[in-house]
Image: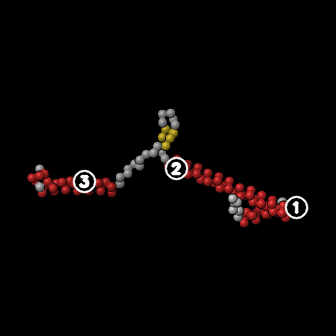
Amino acid sequence: MKPNISTETQQEALAAAKATQKPGQTKEQTKLIAQGIEKGIAEYKKLQKAKARERDKFRKQQLKAKSRPAVEDEDGNTFTEHLAPQGQFTRATWVAIALLLLSWIGFAAYYWMANPATGG
């Protein structure tokens, strides 16, 4: 499988091969040197992309680690603790719960007032 080499890379490689051309060197030899330079440039770019991916992974891991709270155990080892979010009920949630409870109490009171023989 031949890697895709951009025309820009091919032009750079040919320019480098021509710049280092020796007297008496044939066009075929220069072309072969340019192909070798192309492969070298492609390999270098591939390595740089891999390094950039690794740096990005490491950066993301660092950000994730900073967002988690760190806790030390008795031995002094630091580890991250996954805690449930604090204050998960908002004011609107508490209002909804209170209204639900009031409606149940109201329904029970209405039922017992309307049916005194069965309810009490």
Rendered location of residue 98, percent (x, y): 27, 54
Q: Which residue corresponds to mark 1?
A: 25
N-terminal-most mark, 2 or 3? 2
Image quarter (top left, top right, bottom left or bottom right) of the N terminus: bottom right
Q: Is residue 20 left or right of residue 102?
A: right
Identify which amino acid the numbered label 1 is placed on: Gln
Q: Quadrant of residue 9?
A: bottom right
N-terminal-most mark, 3 or 1? 1
Which of discs 2 and 1 lies nearer the camera? The answer is 1
Q: Is mark 3 on a helix, strand or loop?
A: helix
At x 11%, y 52%, the residue is 118
Rendered location of residue 108, percent (x, y): 18, 54
Q: Which residue corresponds to mark 2?
A: 64
Task: Looking at the picture, tell me which residue is in the foreground, 32 or 67.
Answer: 32
Identify which amino acid the numbered label 3 is placed on: Leu
Q: Which residue corresponds to mark 3?
A: 101
Q: Are discs 3 and 1 less than 8 Å apart at CB? A: no
Q: In this view, does 89 lie to the left or right of 46?
A: left
